[in-house]
Image (cartoon, rainbow, N blue to C red):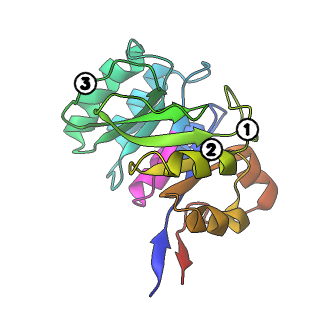
């Protein structure tokens, strides 16, 4: 029996990232726009989301805190488009269950967040960019899978060829960083992998 294993895109705030982000959502594929380090104009994001014909997948954003003004501005626009938002926050953010928002936490160590509002974990091994763990993504996956049944998404050093190893390690999916996407020239970066 084949099982679909999702490969999603993690997009740095570079020129063209917002268009790629919305294009993937319109195709029904998850992509996270990393807004943690600036470089994304709130006005551009909102203008492009409003102009989007349809969004078939959740809009994924990574932010440094719940106080990010983009979150407050994006929620009503996403509601208008009948889209949910996947928000990736630091593991220690005090999030609460919110209609239309799926809270995910980025993890840099093997400590689990105690907050039940966190639906999934993004494991950021030292192969990834930004704030990352001292260990590899695969080591984090092995340690955390023993501790939790929450969905675990792997980010850092993962391309389509390594995604099958993550699937074998019981990950829920992987994020391929946009830098890696540009090096390996994938025409459909978020196509699912089918595991037998």
Residue 187 visible from this viewpoint? no
Residue 191, quarter of the rendered image: bottom right
What residue lies at 46% left-to-right and 73% top-to-bottom? 4
The relative height of residue 191 versus residue 76 in the rendered view (above or below) is below
Q: Which residue lies furthest to the bottom in this view?
A: 1
Q: Position of residue 132 (x, y in %)?
A: 68, 30
Of pointers 2 and 3, the one earlier in the residue sequence: 3
Which of the 4 image quadrants contains residue 86?
top left
Quadrant including the C terminus = bottom right
- Asked which secondary structure carries label 3, the reply is loop
Q: Does the magenta stretch include residue 66?
A: no
Could you tell me if the residues under marks 1 and 2 are in contact, i.e. CB atoms within 8 Å? Answer: yes
Q: Name the residue under label 3.
A: 96
Please state the extent of the stretch shown in magenta in the rendering.
22-32
Pick whichever of labels 1 and 2 is earlier in the sequence. Answer: 1
Q: Nearer the viewer, residue 169 or 146?
A: 146
Residue 140 - label: 2
The local secondary structure at tag 2 comes to: helix
What separation in Å lies between label 1 and label 2 (alpha carbons)?
7 Å
Residue at mark 1: 135
Find numbered disc 1 in the image and state the secondary structure of the residue it sits on: loop
Is 151 positioned to the left or the right of 163 in the image? left
* 48 up-or-down from 138: above or below: above
Compared to residue 45, the image places residue 25 above or below, namely: below
Residue in the image at 60% along x and 52% along y: 142
Q: Name the residue furthest right.
A: 183
Q: Residue 93 carries which label?
A: none
Q: Nearer the observer, disc 2 or disc 3? A: 2
Counting from the top left corner in percent of width and height, residue 113 is at 42, 29
Disc 2 versus disc 3: distance between alpha carbons?
25 Å
Residue 25 is a magenta residue: yes
Q: Residue at x 57, y 35 (%)?
A: 110
């Amino acid at each position: 029996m084949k099982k679909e294993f999702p490969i999603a895109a993690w997009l740095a705030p570079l020129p063209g990232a917002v268009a790629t982000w919305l294009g993937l959502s319109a195709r029904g594929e998850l992509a996270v726009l990393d807004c943690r380090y600036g470089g994304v104009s709130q006005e551009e994001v909102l203008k492009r989301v409003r102009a989007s014909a349809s969004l078939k997948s959740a809009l994924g954003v990574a932010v440094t805190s719940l106080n990010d003004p983009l979150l407050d501005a994006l929620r009503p626009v996403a509601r208008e488009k009948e889209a949910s938002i996947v928000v990736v926050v630091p593991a220690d953010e005090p999030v609460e269950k919110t209609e239309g928002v799926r809270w995910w936490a980025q993890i840099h160590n093997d400590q689990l967040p105690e907050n039940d509002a966190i639906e999934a974990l993004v494991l950021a091994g030292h192969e990834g960019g930004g704030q990352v763990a001292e260990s590899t993504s695969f080591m984090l996956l092995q340690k955390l899978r023993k501790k939790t049944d929450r969905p675990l998404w792997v980010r850092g050093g993962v391309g389509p060829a390594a995604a099958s190893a993550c699937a074998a390690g019981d990950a829920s999916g992987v994020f391929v960083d946009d830098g890696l996407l540009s090096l390996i020239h994938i025409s459909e970066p978020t196509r699912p992998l089918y595991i037998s």
